[in-house]
Image (cartoon, rainbow, N blue to C red):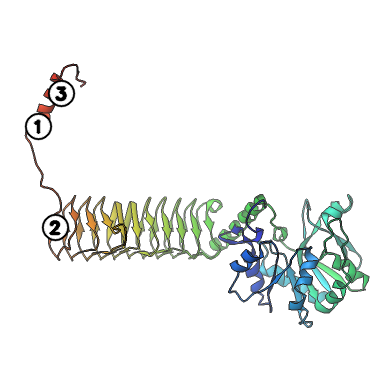
């Protein structure tokens, strides 16, 4: 990957590459589920801590066969079970494919069954060599002859094993390659030499076998997973306009009859309810969008709630711990930070509301800001139901504006405003008749200065 980060921690659809594999395997409810870790083991273990997984260190990593040896204590104590071995870099692998592999393994009565795929170009993948008895061997691409490299059936790096035969074969595993590594694929030859049958089943979708080893392959895996994800959402009734440009994370929910417009990114635990409409060019992280709500063009929403029938945007920023209440409106170039807008409240344009509680049916005029930070601490603003905040108002927190109160435009309010009151906090207007005309005359008569009309 040419990266400082471990390969399996690079993200696809908002979660680490390895997370896709772990979730797929977890769906089979294996007992136990063991991760063999080597490169950046501390970081990988930290990323998957608290999941009930067992970890085994492969230090130093000496090949895939060595990885199986390192974990032997975890699986050897269950000789009556089937051992499933899966590479950690195959995010496209599906549960259905693993079920097919395990079913084929049981039906064949084999000591080992391999998942394979047929590719037009096998590239760096190991080739499957067959004979009349099944799989004869798997040869790694770097060790394959020119004739063997023509084989199109490749090894996916996913195996079902019977425990006892594998234990016996592992004892005979030796480096048989230029790298001096123990290859898991050499178990095929050892099992066959011991008279044990080895079977193989091809994945219905060859893409499931594709591992990720470069940034380009990561991007391709993301593209294929995005397409699969979006197709599933559309099949369930969501409307995705131009799905090729829409990015929806693995843990996002989009209900039937919700509409997602082009170039929209939905991440984390975001949910979009029925009848809601999001985008285009919107990005939502851990946001909840209620039924019938609208998030318009070029909005960023993070860890917030948009209530039923509410409207946000365009060009709005809703920061964490904010709630836009039912049928409330947040307009263009408005930012909310840790703020609640009550039902039907409106902040139509060019405002900042931080650490504020805004009651139902409040109107926030253009250019209004809450001064919530004094350089040391954050302070709350409370605006009660039905209040009217005139344009270009500065509310210096902590402060409360009472129910139904009015704030005159251009005011700086530093004291609480009682319910039903009118507050003005601006300098008295002064008008000097004829001042502008006198100024122009003086400028025109000044020596050495001209006048442009």
Q: How far apart are marks 2 and 3 (CA)?
A: 40 Å
**Mark 1 crowd level (few <14, some 14–19, many ≥20, 10 Å Cα):** few
The residue under label 2 is 423
Q: In the displayed structure, does residue 283 sit left or right of residue 435?
A: right
- Pointer 2 or 1: first along the chain: 2
Residue that appears at 83% across and 79% down = 164
Hey, which residue is sitting farthest left in the picture?
433
- Pointer 2 or 3: first along the chain: 2
The residue under label 3 is 443
Expressed as whole percent of the image width and height from the top left, the position of residue 38 reads 70, 64
Is label 3 in a helix, a strand or a loop?
helix
The residue under label 1 is 435
Q: How far apart are marks 2 and 1 (CA)?
A: 30 Å
In front: label 2 or label 3: 3
Residue 277: name its quadrant. bottom left
Q: Distance between the residues labelled 3 and 1?
A: 12 Å
């Amino acid at each position: 990957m040419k990266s400082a980060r471990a390969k399996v921690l690079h993200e696809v659809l908002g979660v680490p590459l390895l997370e896709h594999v772990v979730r797929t395997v977890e769906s089979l409810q294996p007992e136990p589920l063991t991760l063999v870790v080597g490169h950046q083991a501390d970081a990988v273990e930290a990323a998957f801590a608290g999941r009930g997984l067992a970890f085994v260190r492969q230090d130093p990593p000496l090949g895939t066969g060595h990885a199986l040896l390192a974990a032997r204590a975890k699986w050897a104590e269950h000789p009556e079970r089937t051992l499933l071995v899966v590479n950690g870099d195959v995010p496209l692998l599906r549960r259905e494919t693993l079920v097919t592999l395990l079913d084929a393994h049981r039906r064949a009565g084999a000591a080992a069954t391999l998942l394979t795929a047929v590719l037009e170009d096998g590239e760096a993948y190991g080739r499957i060599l067959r004979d009349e008895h099944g799989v004869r061997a798997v040869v790694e691409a770097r060790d394959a002859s020119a004739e063997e490299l023509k084989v199109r059936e490749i090894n996916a790096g996913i195996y079902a094993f019977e425990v006892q035969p594998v234990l016996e074969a592992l004892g005979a595993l030796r480096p048989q390659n230029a790298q001096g590594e123990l290859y898991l694929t050499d178990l095929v030859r050892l099992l066959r030499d011991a008279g044990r049958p080895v079977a193989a089943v091809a994945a219905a979708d060859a893409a499931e076998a594709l591992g990720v080893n470069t940034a380009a392959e990561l991007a391709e895996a993301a593209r294929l997973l995005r397409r699969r994800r979006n197709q599933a959402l559309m099949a369930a009734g969501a409307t995705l306009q131009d799905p090729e440009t829409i990015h929806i994370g693995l843990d996002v929910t989009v209900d039937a009859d919700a509409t997602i417009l082009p170039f929209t990114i939905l991440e984390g635990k975001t949910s979009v309810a029925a009848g809601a409409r999001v985008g285009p060019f919107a990005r939502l992280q851990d946001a909840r969008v209620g039924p019938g709500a609208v998030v318009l063009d070029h909005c960023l929403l993070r860890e917030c709630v948009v209530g039923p029938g509410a409207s946000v945007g365009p060009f709005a920023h809703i920061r964490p711990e904010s709630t836009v209440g039912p049928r409330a409106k947040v307009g263009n170039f408005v930012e909310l930070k840790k703020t609640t807008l009550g039902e039907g409240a409106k902040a139509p344009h060019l405002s900042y509301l931080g650490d504020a509680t805004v009651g139902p049916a409040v109107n926030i005029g253009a250019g209004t800001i809450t001064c919530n930070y004094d350089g040391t601490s954050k302070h709350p603003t409370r605006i009660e139901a039905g209040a009217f905040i005139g344009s270009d108002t500065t509310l210096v927190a902590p402060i409360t504006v009472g129910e139904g109160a009015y704030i005159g435009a251009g005011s700086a309010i530093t004291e609480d405003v009682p319910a039903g009151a009118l507050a003005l906090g601006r300098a008295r207007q002064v008008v000097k008749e004829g001042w502008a005309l006198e100024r122009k005359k003086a400028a025109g008569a000044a020596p050495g200065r001209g006048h442009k009309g």
